[in-house]
Amino acid sequence: MVDRRAPADPGALARALGDGWELEPAPDASPAAPIEPQPLTAANVWAALETVPDPEVPVISVVELGIVRDVEIDGDALTVVITPTYSGCPAMREIERDVLAALHARGWADARLRTVFAPAWTTEWMSDAARAKLRAYGIAPPRAGGASAGLVTLRRRGAAPEPVPCPFCGSHATRLQSAFGSTACKALHTCDDCRQPFEEFKPI
């Protein structure tokens, strides 16, 4: 509980809200189910990372999401390089804990994470497999080419956005209901043909 009478401490407030802005490193996750130790190879590490789901959209892995940028091996030391989807994403601390738990469970005790912010993550990094899984899950995937590679193009106020295809029936007769869905990275739409509400993973 945050004491509203006391001066606000940014770190305490962030921890109370759980918005991913904790100043201290994320605490160790509960140990994952033990797995037979595996040789430390790049192929084995990537395979282990493929088993870590995105906590907000568990149908895709953190690798398919595109936030795992590189795997670095130096002797027994392992570093996984990740890029957040956006600054302050509330799922990042949980992703960090889940990634480390998966690596430690395979016997790679010296595994650590390094976070890089440039280049910034974009939905263009999502794999085609991830987009197909999102659609099958009932979430409209981000449109290819929908993210800006540089400056964001401004539109006139009131300009109608391009309809997002319904993931259930494929119709383009859809309407934006809210720019924000269950999370900040999604928008809420409805389909006029099948009458289903659905979320869109917004292109970034």
Image (cartoon, rainbow, N blue to C red):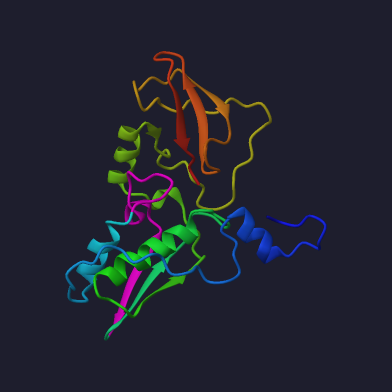
Looking at the image, which residue sits at the far top?
Answer: 193
Q: Which residues are drawn in magenta?
A: 53-74
Residue 201, picture quadrant = top left
On screen, residue 3 versus residue 34, left or right, reads: right
Q: Which residue appears at 43% of the width and 40% of the height?
A: 142
| 189 shown above or below 20 | above
Residue 84 appears in view: no
Q: Nearer the viewer, residue 26 or 34?
A: 34
The quarter of the picture where the N terminus appears is bottom right
Could you say where residue 162 lies in the image, as x and y percent from the top left?
Answer: 50, 28
Q: Position of residue 90 (x, y in %)?
A: 53, 53
| Residue at position x 60%, y 43% in the image | 153
Q: Position of residue 172 (x, y in %)?
A: 42, 21
Q: Position of residue 187 (x, y in %)?
A: 52, 34
The verdict on residue 51 being magenta is no
Give the residue displayed 39% in from the left and 44% down from the top.
57
- Residue 63 inside the magenta-drawn segment: yes
Q: Residue placed at 78% from the left, 55% from the top?
A: 4
> Horizontal placement of 19 versus 50: left or right?
right
Question: Eyeballing the image, is 156 above or below 116?
Answer: above
**Residue placed most toward the observer, 39 or 126:** 39
Q: Residue furthest bottom?
A: 75
Res. 31 visible in picture: yes
Q: Nearer the viewer, residue 158 or 169?
A: 169
